Image (tube, helix red, strand yellow):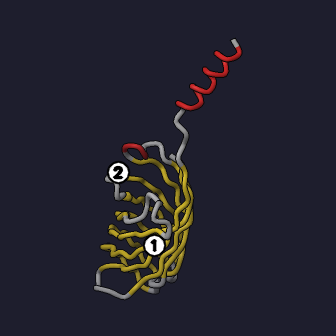
Amino acid sequence: MKKIIITLTFTIISTMAFANSGKFNASGMGSWEMNIMNAGNGNMAITYDGNAGLSDKNPESIFDKSTMNCVGGLTLVSGKFDDETGMCTFYLADGEKVFMNYKGKGTGGQGGSGTFKIIGGTGKYEKISGTGFSSRQNLKGKEGFAHSMNQMSGEYTY
């Protein structure tokens, strides 16, 4: 009887699906089409929609060689913002997607930083979750677009 219980326990444990988890440290550059309402004196409402390509320091990360599309907005008051919010879709190299919400603060024309929460995905990443930190530095480029270098680091489980 003892052997049967041990065998059943081992069988149950060995067939359970264990969660996958990882850390990531991705960076890349992107361009963002902007809509701007300019009230002067550094006061603006801005919405944006754009894309970036990413690579990760860890080539085994699910975010290595991915792209992201983000839609968001912020309000500048005297050149500063503390209300940036948005959502990104990551298009992963394996064909699946991961979704993220973010919040940030910073200085207009320079960059910003904030936190994000991974809220789900498609396929094997349907139940993915995670958190992390992001930052960006604005770059010079074509007028009417924002251009930035983006860094993201965090942890995920799926």
Q: Which residue is mark 2?
A: 96
Residue that carries the numbered disc 1 in the rendered image: 27
Q: Considering only vertical position in the picture, is 61 above or below 3?
A: below
| Location of residue 77 in the rendering, given as x and y in whole percent from the top left corner | 51, 78
- Residue 13 vertical placement versus 67 (above, below): above
Residue drawn at the location 42% of the way across and 64% of the way down: 64
Secondary element at image label 2: loop
Counting from the top left corner in percent of width and height, residue 158 is at 50, 46
Q: Please give the name of the residue rendered at 52% of the width and 49% of the height, measured from the top-left corner.
A: 129
Which mark sits nearer the N-terminus, 2 or 1? Answer: 1
Q: Residue at x 37, y 46 (%)?
A: 122
| Secondary element type, mark 1 | strand
Indicate whether 94 appears above or below 147. above
Crowd class of label 2 (few under 14; some 14 to 19; many from 20; radius 10 Å): some
Residue type indicated by callout 1: Ser
Quick check: 56 left or right of 155?
Answer: left
